[in-house]
Every structure is written in structure tokens, then in C-alpha cells.
Amino acid sequence: MTLPTVTTIAETRSAVAAVRGAGRSVALVPTMGALHDGHLALVARAREAADAVVTSVFVNPLQFGPAEDFDRYPRTLEADTAALERAGVDLLFAPSVADMYPEGRTRITVAAGPVGDLLEGRVRPGHFDGMLTVVAKLLHIVGPDVVLFGQKDAQQVFLVRRMVADLNVPVRVEVVPTVREPDGLARSSRNRYLSAEDRRRALALPSALAAAAAATDAGPERMLAAARAELEGREGVEPDYLVAVDPATFRPVDDRYRGPALVLVAARVGGTRLIDNELVSLG
Ligand code: AMP
């Protein structure tokens, strides 16, 4: 069966109503397309979590800054459709910008709050407001029982959970572990920007996380120093941040902290910004 694809909000609502009318539960997997195995892991988990899976493919202009890669972000809808069909998705929602924002930018937006200004938000002002706004719209359009996100975007996961809790959104949030290439690089739609040389250099990110995970006994500062040694001074790699945060608050931990910590790294490799993270236990 070919994958039903809808582009308008009205079509999406009526397709989902038909699924619900048959007594079936619904999972939503929001994506920006250029799909890879990371996205497909979300779909696979969604199929276990609900009876029917809706995937959205939408490159959301609201979450890109003026100097960012919105225009050149990879758009591969034909290949994405084929991959989603093979993965057993029930409905593809692929709206245009005009479908989602018929009157231009929404005047009412979701404000990410203080954590939205840290880390990714510091480098990408307004990114998380734009992301949460589109996620809120997608949740209202589809009304899923469960929505799935990847741990790869840890700050996004934190903020979506906050929004769902703070605004009483009736949906369950599920998080899927980061899918990696065999050599450890986290899968990302942006990896296709990397030259062969930059692709090798990008391994500095997972190496830094591995060094952190191997040094948790030394305490936060020495753990981060071990990780930094893998990142700094590498040709073609410009580190942006490398921090350990408390997963409950997303605030950097101090050196006395013991317990679970998320080590988050961002770096620019040959002009492409890459992020990664790993949950460690500071002992
Ligand atoms: P994007 O298309 O980049 O907006 O990503 C859509 C969803 O896929 C988000 O929830 C991401 O966190 C998730 N995702 C992206 N890359 C990976 C990965 N390597 N492993 C698991 N999930 C991922």
C-alpha cells in the first residue's frame, strides 16, 4: 500500500479522526525530513507505542536564525516518503510553510523560558521558541496519544517535556536513544554537509563523550577536562560548548555534584554545527 500523504491541516485532522473512529491510538513522530536511521528508530518505537503512526516532515522556518541553513537544509521528500512507507508509517503530514503559517509568522508563540537561552539557545537565539511553537501546533493538529523525540537533541527533549507539563498538554512524551554510525558519530541530517575529511574530524565529538564517560570517578571538572582534551587543538574542529548539566534542571553542575549528569557537546566542523550528548553517572 502506498503511504497516504496529506499536506493540509484539515486533511490531517480528518485522517486522524478516521483512525480514532476505528478505536486506534495514534503516535506522532515530528521531523524535518532528510530522514536517516535515527528518525526511523523513532518510527519503529512509535509503532510499538501506538496502533497508528503519523510522521510529519516540515522544515520549520521559525526555528532557524537569519544566518542559519533554512534555505539549504536538505529536502528529500521523495526518498523520505519511500523510507517511511517501508518503515510502516500510516500517514505522512508534509505541509508547506503556507499551510502551517497562512498569515506569516504566528504572533502568538511558545516561550521556552530560561533554559531556552542556554547552550543551543545561546548560539541560536529564538530557536527553542520556534521549535516549541511548531511542536505545539503539530500536537494540536494531530492530537496524538504519544509523541516521540530523539535523545540526540537533549535540550529539545527537556523543553518539550517542560512545555507538556507546564501547559498540561494531553500527550505522553517518549524519548529514543541516539542512533549512531558504526564509528560512533551520531546520525544527523546535517552530516551530509561534511566533506570526507570533516567526517573524520567530526569523530572528536563522540571521542570527547567517551573520554567523559571513562572519567566520571574523577568528578565533574576533571571529567570535563578529559573530554576537552579530545576536542581542543583538533584541526578543523571549533568547539562551541562542552558542559555537564543536571538532567533535572539543565543547569551546569558544580564540582561537588554527584549523580546523573548529561554531558553536552557542540562544535563546528568545517562550517557545520554538530551536537551530541551522553548521560553519565558521576560517582
Ligand atoms: P530533525 O529532523 O533533526 O528535527 O529530528 C527529528 C527527530 O529525530 C528529533 O526528535 C530528533 O531528536 C530525532 N533524531 C535526530 N537524529 C537522531 C539520532 N541520531 N538518533 C535518534 N533520534 C534522532
Image: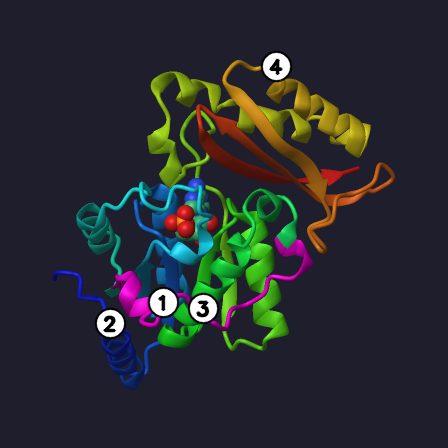
The residue where tag 2 is placed is 8
CB contact under 8 Å: marks 1 and 3? no
Q: Is residue 229 above or below residue 5?
A: above
Identify the mark nearer the N-term, 3 or 2. 2
Q: Is residue 239 above or below residue 2?
A: above
Residue at x 48% of width, y 58% of height? 131
The residue where tag 4 is placed is 233
| SS type, badge 3 | strand
Residue at x 42% of width, y 71% of height? 137
Residue 104: assigned label: 1
Could you tell me how far apart the alpha carbons at marks 1 and 3 are, in whole angstroms? 29 Å
The residue where tag 3 is placed is 146
- Look at label 1 and name its amino acid: Gly
Task: Tell me the quarter of the image containing the C terminus.
Answer: top right
Q: Which residues are magenta?
A: 93-116
Could you tell me how far apart the alpha carbons at marks 1 and 2 are, in whole angstroms? 16 Å
Residue 210: assigned label: none
CB contact under 8 Å: marks 1 and 2? no
Characterize the local packing of mark 1: few (<14), some (14-19) or many (20 or more) Cα atoms within 10 angstroms.
few
